[in-house]
Image (cartoon, grey):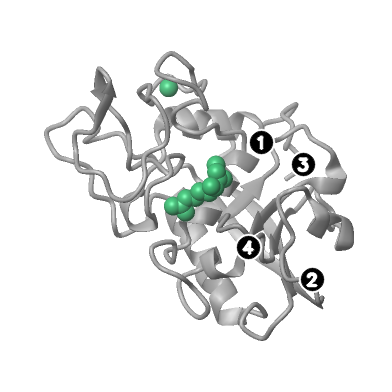
Amino acid sequence: GLGVINIPVYVHVVYSNANQNISNTQIASQISVLNEDFRKANNDLNLPSGTTFANDATDVEIEFTLANTFRYSNARTSWGTNNAVKSAYPPVSPSTHLNIWVAEIGGGILGYAQFPGGNSATDGVVISPQYFGTTGFVSAPFNKGRTATHEVGHYLNLRHIWGDGRCRQDDFVADTPSSDGPNYGCPSFPTVNCKTPDMTMNYMDYTNDACMYMFTDGQRNRMRAILNPGGARAAL
Ligand code: ARG
Ligand code: ZN
Ligand code: CA
């Protein structure tokens, strides 16, 4: 195997007001969360003991290093989900770097990502500033940096835990149980929609930041497969 993989990150801060021009401290807080979550070093792991999920949290062995930050002032106040911000400020070396745009999407949307294998001109992740990092201009209950963890999961080929379908729609990961649709808020265990408990605490559900805290072994393998030689993100 590849051992611990390091992904260098470029952060593009696109702001129309001073709040959105987030601090270097806020950016660093997000890089820290990514490193904790992808190394199973997060201190909020809370899997219900004595259940089928008790031992399912996995160290993905991916780390992230901030390579550079770019800042752009722009009068536009929302950027939508159609890659407009990437057209305005193109990704830098997307085959070797994860590009993250911190820009107001609008409509209460937290973030969006491009799956592996897409157009390099739009490759990367976009997150609204108030959902990026854990300190500064952040907004509960999405102030624990989990939007980036979720979006980087997509960027590394993970689907939503419910497969974007109903109970029988697969997320292509064997050890995540089927679920019927997104869960929100902070569900209690067990939350059952498809015969067995939903893994509401998985980063790829839609629960509050404080209530998602794990990837599984199957998700680890799916993410690392595209980083292996021949994989869509091998150059990272
Ligand atoms: N809605 C976004 C997506 O589907 C992000 C959801 C992130 N959830 C969170 N608790 N931060 O990609
Ligand atoms: Zn998602
Ligand atoms: Ca599954």
Mark 2 against mark 1, which lies toward the viewer? 2
Q: Kindly identify the amino acid type of the residue bearing the numbered disc 2.
A: Arg
Q: Please name the residue shown 51% across and 54% down the image.
A: 147
Query: Looking at the rendering, in which quadrant would you find the C terminus?
Result: top right
Residue that badge 4 annotates: 65
Position in image of residue 14 (x %, y %): 75, 71
Would you place residue 127 above or below residue 70 in this image? Answer: above
Position in image of residue 131 (x %, y %): 52, 64
Q: Kindly identify the amino acid type of the residue bearing the numbered disc 3.
A: Ala
- Left or right of 137: which side holds 51? left
Residue that badge 2 annotates: 76
* Label 3 – label 2 distance at C-alpha: 33 Å
Residue that badge 1 annotates: 227
Position in image of residue 69 (x %, y %): 73, 72
Q: In the orientation shown, which residue stands out farthest toward the bottom?
A: 18
- Tell which circle, 3 or 4, labels the residue nearer the N-terminal end: 4
- Tell which circle, 3 or 2, labels the residue nearer the N-terminal end: 2
Residue that badge 3 annotates: 235
Q: Kindly identify the amino acid type of the residue bearing the numbered disc 1.
A: Leu
Would you place residue 171 above or below residue 31 in this image? Answer: above
Q: Kindly identify the amino acid type of the residue bearing the numbered disc 4.
A: Thr
* Label 1 – label 3 distance at C-alpha: 7 Å
Mark 3 against mark 2, which lies toward the viewer? 2
Residue nearest the viewer, comparing 232 with 123: 123
* Label 4 – label 1 distance at C-alpha: 16 Å
Query: Looking at the rendering, in which quadrant would you find the N terminus?
Result: top right
